[in-house]
Amino acid sequence: MKILIVLTYYRPHISGLTIYAERLAKAFAARGHEVTVLTSGFKKELPAEEIVDGVRIVRAPVLFRLSKGVIMPTFGLIANRLVRETDVIQLHLPQFDAAGISLRGRLLKKPTVITYHCDLLMPAGLFNRLANFSVKIMNQLTGLFTHKIVTYTQDYADNSSYLRQYTDKLKIIPPPVVLPAVTKDDVQQFAREHNPQNRHPVIGMATRFASEKGVEVLLKALPEVLKVFPDAVVQFVGTYKKVFSEEAYFERLRPEIESFEASGNWQFLGELDPEQMARYYPNLDVLTVPSLNSTEAFGLVQIEAMMNGVPCVTSSLPGVRQPVKLHDMGTIFPIGDSQALAQGLISVLRTGKENFKNKLDFSRYQPDDIAQAYEKLFQEIQQTL
């Protein structure tokens, strides 16, 4: 089967959406499918076309950026060619360019599936409000034209104003989660490099440094945690410098972060590749996901942490709260409540990660199984065309 996957940002960009798309693309390729990813050439040094891990990546040239989006004048021409070559289409939303692809899929009778990852909420400002409105319109058109819509959990679907419009098209499929195998020596070496003073407990946060991720909620909670665990350290993994549209947010929080850095209670580890992440998680005592709004719909990092025996303290966002509820590994706190986050962290740390036992098999997230679920969905659509 020839599968076309379309999204705005693909590797080397790092986000939950791109990680999902990459894992699924590689799983399709491993199952013998011919996989093409159509995406943006968001960095000029990226090749227009290449094959990585058996996946063909085609990048449309970017003329310029508009807020978090990109303008690609030749995208439609490239899409025309690739859609005609393909058997089925998978679109990752939110995405401005998806409507045209889904219309092509409808007209050419190519089974087309949306994977809806989260809502889009742009930063404050007139231009960003206009951009947000434009993407919402295009997402609505995409939803009308597409054959089926996939999302991670029923919890998120029930609370999403977008997904509630398309209940007849909805399919729940868990996200693909996998980490490279690493040795105990690898894990210990990571600790020696990044925590040479052996400070404990280690609190993990793995995300982009962005306003919707709730970094300030953790910062406000940290003094209470340090009263009980004065040697605690937060290890923040992910892009934190010059995150597009988030520079002012970082600068606002910088003084507080620098004070914690000076006392040894905060570390930025930067971007880590999958193997480094596999070494990172076992060194944590707890992971926190204090996200603030529906731009977060699950939090893949929670499953990755739990696979390594690490409990999570997570905000009670629809979808985001599901990993803790499903696996009973951690606790949930009210959105934006720093005091509740502090108490949740203290409680989980006192309990000890070794005392949290997963109650649901993690095999449900195997990329091969997720790829098979999509294959079945494509086949069901094909039978109706």
Image (tube, rainbow, N blue to C red):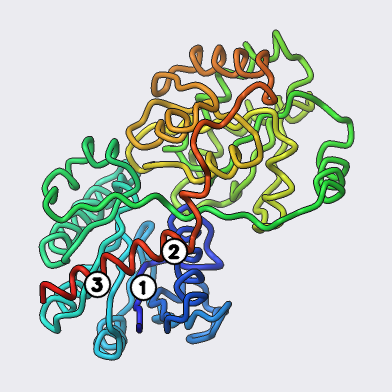
Find disc 2 in the rendering and name its residue: 21
Give residue 263's mark: none
Q: Nearer the viewer, mark 3 or mark 2?
A: 3
Q: Is residue 128 left or right of residue 313?
A: left
The structure residue drawn at horizontal position 83% and vertical position 51%, both measured from the top left corner, is: 186
User: Label 2 amino acid?
Assistant: Ala
Q: Quadrant of residue 237?
A: top right
Among numbered discs 3 and 2, the one appearing first in the sequence = 2
Q: Quadrant of residue 35?
A: bottom left
Distance from Cα at disc 3 to Cα at disc 1: 16 Å
Callout 3: SS: helix
CB contact under 8 Å: marks 1 and 2 = yes
Among numbered discs 1 and 2, the one appearing first in the sequence = 1
Q: Is residue 189 left or right of residue 135?
A: right
Callout 1: SS: strand
Pinpoint residue 40: horizontal percent, then vertical percent.
41, 74
CB contact under 8 Å: marks 3 and 2 = no
Among numbered discs 3 and 1, the one appearing first in the sequence = 1
Q: Is residue 370 left or right of residue 262?
A: left
Distance from Cα at disc 1 to Cα at disc 2: 8 Å
Find disc 1 in the rendering and name its residue: 5
Q: Is residue 60 above or below residue 225?
A: below
Q: Count neighbours of disc 1 (C-alpha within 10 A) and say few if under 14, some if 14 to 19, many if 20 or more.
A: many
User: Label 1 amino acid?
Assistant: Ile
Image quarter where the N terminus lies is bottom left
The structure residue drawn at horizontal position 11% and vertical position 77%, both measured from the top left corner, is: 385
Give residue 379's mark: 3
